[in-house]
Image (tube, grey):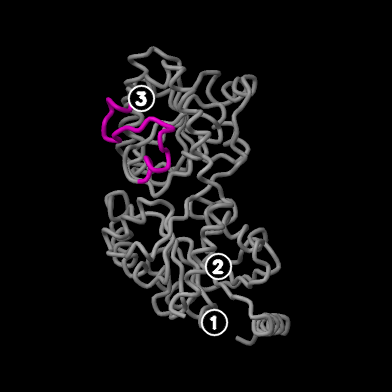
Amino acid sequence: MEKKPDEARNDVFWDELYHREKIMRIAVNTRLLLKGKLEGIGWFTYETLKRITKAHPEHEFIFIFDRKPDPSFIFSDNVKAVVAHPQARHPILWYLFFEFGVYRVLRKYKPDVFLSPDGWLSLRSKVKSVAVIHDLNFEAHPEFLPAHIAKYYQRFFPRFSRKATRIATVSEYTRKDLHERYAIPLSKTDVVYNGANTLFKPLSDAEIRNVRNEFSDGAPYFLFVGLIHPRKNLENQIRAFDAFKKASKSDMKFLIVGAKHWWSTGLTDILDTTKFREDIIFLGRKDMESLVRIYGGAHALMYVSYFEGFGIPIVEAFHAEIPIITSATSSMPEICGDAGITVNPDSIVEITAAMEKITADNELRNHLIEKGRNQREKFSWDKTADALWETIEKAVIADR
């Protein structure tokens, strides 16, 4: 199809600028920048690219979308948005998007490097690449995904990992997991921790009362934030809450914030049989302003997942200055450090005991909050963007 004159002039402008100034051209997979639908990897993409593009105005960035982008994602004048087809909506289209749509864009613009914040690469392309691999949950727990999707990931992510010039992981745990499962050299990978939104903060006593009146009938509450998905282990957390309520006679509630991604029959059965169903409140997705208030009003965060590549809610809780109960598995002990109570996610007894401790022992609660203030200093989106940029630079100069 013939280009409009304005589009042709724009392409000529970028090509001339590239050759005249010797700028670096960086293509980026931005398919997860979706207005109003940013999840974990989408937030990573948003927070890092917003900083990197503004911090490096001398370089050109080609953002590759699979649909018309929202203008708010074009962060600065050095960003050019390109739409590749088809839209990446299921496994067959994933393959076509990267092996044909993305491939054509890379062949046309000839970037110095291709950055993929979700780890997917075009295997046909010879362009140097940086893959951000957040976790290998599909290897550790394939049962938590539809079988055809788990198999697709298991087939392609070893190939993406080998193809990448360099890999960034969001935890040391994932870095070692790649090494052990796929034999990826540790020298090829960099740990680039996630950050957390600094809007999260502690609330005053009056603010806490207002939040609790609005969301939990005035009662204190445990809080879970995340997708409602079998990997998040909500079933055992609800069982533990049920046991806690029976033993403590507390008026505590359990607030669950997140979209119903994969609702299981097991979760329905547990909710139907628990004695304290009316004390378990599903709030669905909440906007950032509400989420900040809900965090700040919580008695403690419950984040007892089976598996996480990082666990951003842990760091959000550090900023809200509430204590944390999380899992002693995968990356969660690494991110939480000694600033929370870690438990076996399969043990109802351990989860219940942690709830009882964090409710009955104010000294422990305050100690964990203070530890969280220290631990949160390790994580910020500014540090994430700087570390990811270093990985990009390493990829560009590789094999020169």
Separation of residues labelled 1 and 3 (CA atoms): 54 Å
Looking at marks 1 and 2 on the same chain, the residue that comes earlier in the sequence is marked by 2
With 357 as the anchor, is 199 left or right in this view? right
| The residue stretch that appears in magenta | 331-351
- Residue underneath mark 3: 354
Q: Nearer the viewer, mark 2 or mark 3?
A: 3
Q: Position of residue 199 (x, y in %)?
A: 62, 39
Looking at marks 1 and 3 on the same chain, the residue that comes earlier in the sequence is marked by 1
Separation of residues labelled 2 and 3 (CA atoms): 44 Å
Looking at marks 2 and 3 on the same chain, the residue that comes earlier in the sequence is marked by 2
- Residue underneath mark 1: 110
With 67 as the anchor, is 223 left or right in this view? left
Local crowd at mark 3 within 10 Å, few (<14), some, or many (≥20)? many
Image height check: is 45 above or below 14?
above
Marks 1/3 in contact by CB < 8 Å: the verdict is: no
Q: Based on the displayed image, in which of its 4 quarters is residue 202 positioned? A: top right
Q: Which mark is residue 374?
A: none
Separation of residues labelled 1 and 2 (CA atoms): 17 Å
Marks 1/2 in contact by CB < 8 Å: the verdict is: no
Image height check: is 363 above or below 261?
above
With 219 as the anchor, is 169 left or right in this view? left
- Residue underneath mark 2: 65
Image height check: is 304 above or below 75?
above
